[in-house]
Image: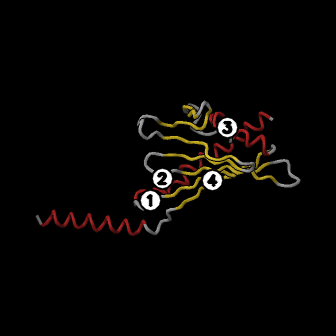
Amino acid sequence: MRLIKLALLSFIFLFLLVTIISLFVPSHVIISRAINIKANKDSVLSQIKDPARWKNWHPGLDTAQQLMVEGKVNGVVLDATDITKPIIIILDKVSEEEVTAMFFPRKMKPVKNTWRAITHPGSDSTTVQWSMDFHLRWYPWEKFGSLMLERSHGTKMEQGLTNLKKLVHRIN
């Protein structure tokens, strides 16, 4: 009985210690990547603001099912195995300078994806900045998992921007 008590108290103490340490890890994380594309802003944004074209450059979306809203493609379904909570990316806002899409994972808060097109006076290129905005809950496993977001999502973002650059150069 004493051994069970000791094990239980040790587990509670360890959990509290890990939780307290995780409180020092930020709950708001932004990952950002950028690339220069030798094309005008409209050529670049036309590929980003149309979810039907995402499969041509966004990593992992080449086989994703398109999400139709009112007869128009408004996003993609990444995983529909749980019909009550599918994993989706939905186009949120489109403006002259940027496009925003919301990524709805199953076990996290929604993630805001923003693609911003920046033009430079006297230049023939457009800088495309892609950022992912994560808001994490207090859970220790989410906080410590956020330390890996840069590695897991950053490389996919770089690959996507490189694919976008190749696509726009091929079209123009």
The percent coordinates of residue 88 (x first, y second) are 52, 40
Q: Which residue is mark 2?
A: 109
Looking at the rendered structure, the secondary structure element under dot 2 is loop
Relative to the observer, which residue lies in front, 93 or 166?
93
Disc 3 versus disc 4: distance between alpha carbons? Answer: 18 Å
Q: Which residue is mark 4?
A: 131
What amino acid does circle 4 point to?
Ser
The percent coordinates of residue 134 (x first, y second) are 53, 56
- For image coordinates 37% across by 65% down, the residue present is 19
Tags 1 and 2 in contact by the CB under 8 Å rule?
Answer: yes
Q: Which residue is mark 3?
A: 50
Q: How dense is the environment of label 4, judged by Cα within 10 Å: few (below 14), some, or many (20 and up)?
A: some
Disc 4 versus disc 1: distance between alpha carbons? Answer: 20 Å
What amino acid does circle 3 point to?
Asp
The percent coordinates of residue 90 (x first, y second) are 57, 42
Q: Quadrant of the C terminus?
A: top right
